[in-house]
Image (tube, coloured by chain):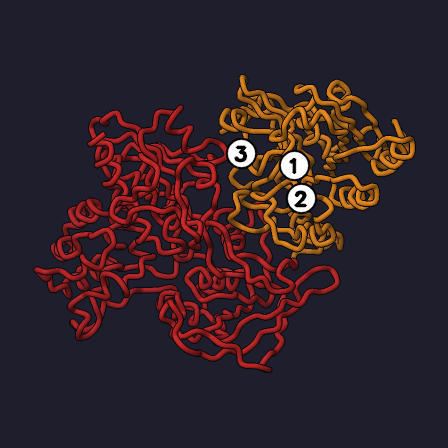
Amino acid sequence: MDVLHKVPVREQEAAARARNFAEVCLGYNEEEAVAEAERCLNCKNAQCVKGCPVAIDIPAFINEVKNRNFKKAYEIISESSALPAVCGRVCPQESQCEGKCIRGIKGEPVSIGKLERFVADWAREHGITPKKPEKTNGHKVAVIGSGPAGLTCAGDLARMGYEVTIFEALHEAGGVLIYGIPEFRLPKEDVVAKEVENVKALGVKIETNVVIGKSVTVDELMDEEGFEAVFIGSGAGLPRFMGIPGEQANGVFSANEFLTRNNLMKAFKEEYDTPIMRGKKVAVVGGGNVAMDAARTALRLGAEVHIVYRRSEEELPARVEEVHHAKEEGIIFDLLTNPVEIHVDENGWVKGMTCIRMELGEPDESGRRSPVEIKGSEFDIELDTVIMSLGTSPNPLISSTTKGLDINRRKCIVAKEESGATSKPGVFAGGDAVTGAATVILAMGAGKAAAQGIHEYLSNK
Amino acid sequence: MYPIVKSEKLADKIYLMEIKAPRVAKSCEPGQFIIAKTDEQGERIPLTICDYDRTAGTVTIVIQTVGASTERMVKLKAGESLMDFVGPLGRASELISTDIEELKKKKIVFIAGGLGTAPVYPQVKWLHNHGVDCDVIMGAKTKDLLIYVDEMKKAATNLYVTTDDGSFGFHGMGTNQLQALYDEGARYDLCIAIGPMIMMKFVCLLTKELNIPTVVSMNPIMVDGTGMCGACRLTVGGEVKFACVDGPEFDGHLVDFDQAMKRQQIYKTEEGRAMLKLTEGDTHHGGCGQCGGDK
């Protein structure tokens, strides 16, 4: 066995998967998982755990995989994470646990993410679900948003005995896991819905179709409905646009709209009513994970797809694995390129776009070299669809309707990192609503910290 | 699930439903909307609230069938349920946060066109209940398409009914009726126009000329209704606004109607196709030349 390399994971072949929505990565089977687990050095001072925002006892669960005690492995992960099947699929392991793995100093790190996924999938296939606490402590906590932050916070609180209700604005629970991340990266029915069921199995109630700030306010939840504490995990939902001419044309979409139509509303399936534009030639503007998701979705709907990104490949904020998969599937990368204007035909539809070439200048405050326009390098491309994937900002619906809740100049809720506590007593917050758009696992870390913060607050009340 | 308390046909392709949705009924105000979804496969459909009963916990909506999702929705009867019903969404009409005494000093006229009569009604009723006078011009293409005439009669100070073909009331459109009232000496301080975009556009052209500040309620394509997708964006006074969170009501003299009308066409062929598939079943192969075909 080659200890320097990961046991390769089986994937759908690129040409085939570029035309379907089935999951790209097929995951390890038992033999592969055990072989990969053998590579773990079981370090005493495990660096990987320090790299995990929810501090899963990684060497311990991998050791159980090695011994084929998969159930025990699942129990170890479950102590720290409510969503292992999700995290095993979408966490940026290369910059977290696997980035710190000692095995990775010489050779490749242990494939921690794929092992986590294997354990979670094994547990699901064997019908293992978390157990509900025998009795509750009678204290009611409201959780706003059923995305990664909310589900984690709710799960942790329920395990401590709290009576938790999650309020979700959309008609299905899961937040970004449902509307944002596509089926081919994160299967909805088999993975997301089952993880949500697991949180419900802990006794958590989920009320969908409730828009906090509209249907009911945070103050009403506390004053009239008897919730003693509230966690706000409402995410960063408002899409950004560039502000260039032609952006209101038909055929220009936010990545949020495009992905929501496809993922939440299942527009890619024949039997669903919600329409989606199947472009012939699509430009996705942006270089993050959401841009990769939108591009690979448009590709599967039958388009030729270009990623238009103003910096170079090295600065792409998307995970390396996603960029790699996108390239394999045939996405074309137009790097160091920025849109200047969208051309519109006489009926209001997109017909093309003027772009300008960029070069990298001095590093900006983010540490990345800032792109500078090359004068006179404008060129036109023909297109029928443009998808703007430029990031999102928090929705002011909750902050503007909650008395005494402070926000910063980016409209993010101000909350203490260690406890999630906000300026309003009893109200906690975490995830993208606090940090602006980030990752699933960071939101889970914040949900976890807030659950502890809420527990301490209610214990000392 | 959200039980349907009442379901009735008001006119050709126009249906009324009363839905049990206590959270919405408790907090909604005139001018706001809801999003309803019939079943698992259905679209999320934005519909303006046209009445509510806080005690009974019910909300009344009026639906015009335009596609497969609405066709399935209106087939449901009292006793059955809608799968999803969320709201209230959008901002309430500015009227309800204006001082009542101030409102009483104003001459207010509503212009409602077609289905727009439904969202106008709760505002008129609200003013009536607060002792504020207002005139209402409501119209439809023809007599059979008029809705809410009796209810409006009770709530409006003066009601002017118009039909495009002259089959009932004033022969002409809402704009013609407004002009006629103006010519007879009527003066208004505020106009609220709700109806098809083309109607609102022409009302705004007229009221600009007559110097009457005008509020319109926009109902563009939407998905989530909470600000997340940006599908409902429109240009108001040169700025990009989201109808779902910044509206649905805007200063009609600032709205770029031509752009908004073009944006409404985005899924026209897709919606038409879904509808044909529903009505024609397996016999629909997209070769009729009417629907754009199945590409």
Report the chain shown in red: A
Seen at 83% across and 43% down, the residue is B206
Q: Secondary structure at mark 3?
A: strand
Q: Colour of chain B?
A: orange
Q: Amino acid at mark 1?
A: Glu
Is B266 left, or right, of B172 in this rendering?
left
Decide: marks 2, 1 in contact (CB < 8 A)?
A: yes
In 3D space, how far apart are the residues under numbered discs 1 and 3 (Cα atoms)?
22 Å
Q: Amino acid at mark 2?
A: Met
Residue A149 x/y as whole percent:
33, 46
Mark 1 or mark 3: name the one nearer the start of the chain. Answer: 1
Residue A365 x/y as whole percent:
38, 68
The residue identified by callout 2 is B275
The residue identified by callout 1 is B71
Q: Secondary structure at mark 1?
A: helix
In 3D space, how far apart are the residues under numbered discs 2 and 3 (Cα atoms)?
26 Å
